């Protein structure tokens, strides 16, 4: 391969990462906007009672789903992507057939579980058994959603990312349009049929797009499906267990905050956490849609994995840095806009934790190797250890410094987690960061620290002026660096000329 060919391959790889991130970043933003509009409509048409009932329905069914789905919506992507990378039609067909059998089995398990335990769910959620029938009706959504998840896995694993994005965006739109007449005409009684129709809509959309993929039809029995999908189930179960552990730690922490500081502090923490996870965290969701199957497809080649992680890291750093800086500078506006001025106590938590998001990005890049390589035992041990010390950090952080202390513990926790996963991957996979990524990471983190320092300056106008200057510098730097990797400016110009 010539130097020019090598550069072309490098540019293509960077451009693929950037395009996928932009595509799903846009979908994430759109879905958040639709969710905000839907929440507003529900609040107006159904009032607090309707919002509460819908939330209890969803939390009840989602809890059962987390126990019965076996994490296939995430773990199976690895197997499909790995099969797709071989270009072996029989292996691809065999893997997809096994997956489809497994989603039926786990979906039916979820349906039956909710139907059987519907009186328990009703009693726990509402304090009586009056909502048993609605839970029985909603049990069908666990089967439908699991079948949809299976179709999404096929789209993601086969790298049909545009189709997956279309299905997600259209599904959100149809869900919004469908919900309005039901809530308007039926009120609270329209919640159950709306949730069922939303699930059916997503199933039809994912089926429509996944059926366009030419996959060899390979018949497998239920026993063969379990045998073939052993890796999916093993990794999926590991992911489900760690998700349950994370939910448990969150529950313990919120209970501790309520006991020590009261319900208001729980609200401040929840509001700040929601901003971080939805605003900055959506970048991780957007990137993982493409990153995970690419990493899974080459999971046996440590050198290739190292290259993918570093390239993904470079693009992630250049996209994340301006977002984190924006969050640092404009947190007071974001909280006032999304909540109210009374939530300003959460300002320090969000700003301090935003610094930690940069280390969360670094650890996220590395830790995905454990999933892509199917290292279920390592993944569980890694996550259990991390969840335990992060819970301890949060408890002591809140005890010492209140809500701001939770921001300190978040950042300290992810610095430890970043170090932990780096050492593990260094020993196990001979992983190392490239000098290019390391320079980018250090420079961007230094800019973030400088910006963080300016957020406490007085007067206010000076703080915002310096913050905007730093954001501007970071944006320009990111554009220049992206242009080096993907010829960003010429790429945008070519897109414009096509549209004109």
Image (cartoon, grey):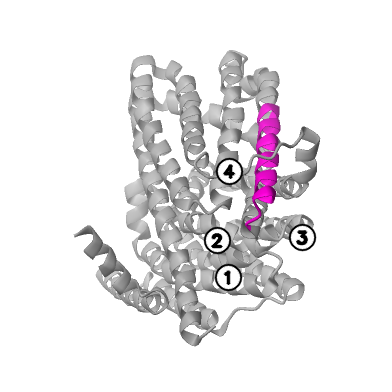
Q: Which residue is mark 3?
A: 378
2 and 1 marks in contact (CB < 8 Å): yes
3 and 2 marks in contact (CB < 8 Å): no
| Label 1 residue SS | helix
Disc 2 and disc 4: Cα gap in Å?
38 Å
Q: Which residue is mark 2?
A: 291
Callout in the foreground (3, 2): 2
Compare marks 2 and 1 and give the one earlier in the sequence: 2
Residue 454 makes an appearance in the image: yes
Residue 411 in the image: x percent, y percent?
56, 65
Disc 2 and disc 1: Cα gap in Å?
8 Å
**What residue do we see at 51% from left, 35% from top?**
207
Q: Which segment is the magenta one?
A: 87-109
**What residue do we see at 70% from left, 57% from top?**
383
Residue 308: numbered disc: 1
| Label 2 residue SS | helix
* Mark 2, other Cα within 10 Å: few <14 / some 14–19 / many ≥20: many
Q: Which residue is mark 4?
A: 258
Callout in the foreground (3, 4): 3
Compare marks 3 and 4 and give the one earlier in the sequence: 4
Callout in the foreground (1, 3): 1
Predominant secondary structure, magenta span:
helix
Callout in the foreground (2, 4): 2
Instruction: From this view, report whether residue 58 is shown above or below residue 241.
Output: above
Callout in the foreground (4, 1): 1
Compare marks 3 and 2 and give the one earlier in the sequence: 2
Compare marks 4 and 1 and give the one earlier in the sequence: 4
The front one of 305 and 258 is: 305
Horizontally, residue 252 falls left or right of residue 472, namely: right
* Mark 4, other Cα within 10 Å: few <14 / some 14–19 / many ≥20: some
């Amino acid at each position: 391969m010539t130097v020019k060919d090598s550069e072309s391959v490098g540019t293509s790889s960077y451009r693929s990462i950037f395009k996928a991130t932009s595509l799903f970043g846009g979908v994430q933003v759109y879905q958040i906007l639709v969710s905000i509009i839907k929440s507003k409509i529900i609040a107006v048409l159904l009032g607090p009672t309707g919002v509460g009932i819908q939330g209890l329905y969803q939390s009840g069914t989602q809890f059962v789903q987390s126990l019965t789905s076996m994490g296939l919506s995430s773990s199976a992507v690895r197997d499909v992507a790995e099969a797709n990378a071989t270009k072996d039609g029989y292996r691809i067909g065999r893997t997809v057939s096994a997956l489809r059998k497994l989603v039926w089995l786990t979906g039916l398990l979820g349906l039956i579980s909710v139907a059987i335990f519907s009186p328990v769910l009703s009693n726990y959620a509402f304090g009586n058994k009056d909502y048993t029938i609605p839970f029985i009706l909603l049990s069908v959504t666990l089967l439908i959603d699991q079948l949809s998840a299976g179709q999404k896995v096929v789209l993601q694993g086969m790298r049909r990312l545009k189709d997956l994005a279309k299905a997600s965006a259209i599904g959100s739109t149809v869900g919004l349009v469908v919900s309005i007449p039901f809530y308007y005409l039926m009120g609270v009684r329209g919640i159950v049929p709306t949730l069922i129709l939303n699930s059916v809509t997503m199933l039809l959309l994912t089926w429509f797009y996944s059926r366009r993929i030419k996959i060899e039809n390979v018949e497998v029995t239920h026993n063969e499906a379990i045998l073939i999908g052993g890796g999916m189930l093993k990794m999926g179960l590991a992911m489900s267990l760690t998700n349950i552990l994370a939910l448990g730690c969150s529950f313990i922490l919120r209970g501790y905050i309520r006991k020590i500081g009261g319900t208001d502090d729980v609200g401040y923490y929840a509001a700040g956490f929601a901003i971080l996870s939805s605003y900055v965290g959506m970048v991780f969701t957007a990137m993982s849609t493409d990153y995970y199957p690419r990493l899974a497809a080459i999971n046996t080649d440590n050198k290739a994995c190292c290259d993918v992680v570093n390239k993904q890291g470079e693009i992630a750093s250049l996209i994340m840095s301006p977002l984190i800086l924006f969050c640092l500078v404009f947190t007071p506006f974001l909280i006032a806009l999304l909540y109210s001025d009374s939530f300003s106590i959460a300002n320090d938590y969000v700003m301090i934790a935003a610094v930690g998001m940069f280390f969360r990005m670094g650890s996220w890049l590395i830790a995905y190797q454990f999933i892509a390589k199917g290292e279920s035992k390592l993944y569980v041990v890694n996550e259990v250890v991390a969840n335990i010390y992060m819970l301890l950090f949060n408890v002591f952080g809140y005890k010492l410094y209140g809500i701001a202390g939770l921001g300190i513990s978040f950042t300290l926790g992810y610095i430890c987690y970043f170090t932990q996963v780096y050492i593990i991957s260094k020993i196990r996979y001979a992983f190392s960061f490239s000098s290019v990524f390391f320079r980018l990471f250090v420079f961007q983190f230094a800019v973030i620290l400088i910006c963080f320092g300016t957020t406490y300056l007085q007067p206010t106008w000076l703080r915002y002026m310096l913050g905007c200057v730093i954001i501007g510098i970071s944006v320009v730097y990111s554009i220049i660096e992206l242009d080096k990797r993907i010829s960003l400016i010429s790429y945008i110009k070519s897109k414009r000329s096509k549209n004109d």
